């Protein structure tokens, strides 16, 4: 075992939502580094969350202003 901690996708998604709502954006790189997941996993997480809170852009999510 490598000592890595597995974080459930739902928890990663919640963190992404909180980040976008508080800072206005989140990058795929931030997600990958924060949770020690691959860029592909971080991309999929952003794809799943983006429609609920913002707009998917190259490299991350930005908050949609009303």
Image (cartoon, rainbow, N blue to C red):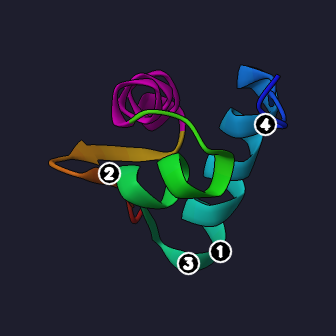
Density class for disc 4 (Cα within 10 Å; few <14, some 14-19, many ≥20) is few
Element under disc 4: loop
Q: Name the residue under label 4.
A: 4
Name the front one of labels 4 and 2.
4
Highlighted range, magenta? 39-52
Q: Mark 2 points at which residue?
A: 60
Image quarter in which the N terminus is found: top right
Q: In the rendered structure, does residue 46 fall within the stretch colored magenta?
A: yes
Q: Residue 22 shows which numbered tag? A: 1
Name the front one of labels 3 and 4.
4
Density class for disc 2 (Cα within 10 Å; few <14, some 14-19, many ≥20) is many
How far apart marks 1 and 2 lie (CA) works out to: 15 Å
Residue 63 appears in the figure: no
Q: Are marks 4 and 2 in contact (CB under 8 Å)?
A: no
Element under disc 3: helix
Q: Position of residue 55 (x, y in %)?
A: 31, 45
- Chain-order first, disc 4 or disc 2: 4
At 70% across and 37% down in the image, what residue appears?
12
């Amino acid at each position: 075992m490598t000592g890595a901690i597995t974080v459930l996708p739902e928890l990663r998604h919640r963190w992404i939502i909180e980040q976008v709502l508080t800072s206005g954006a989140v990058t795929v790189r931030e997600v990958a580094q924060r949770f020690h997941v691959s860029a592909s996993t971080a991309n999929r997480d952003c794809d799943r969350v983006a429609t609920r809170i913002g707009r998917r852009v190259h490299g991350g999510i930005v908050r949609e202003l009303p």
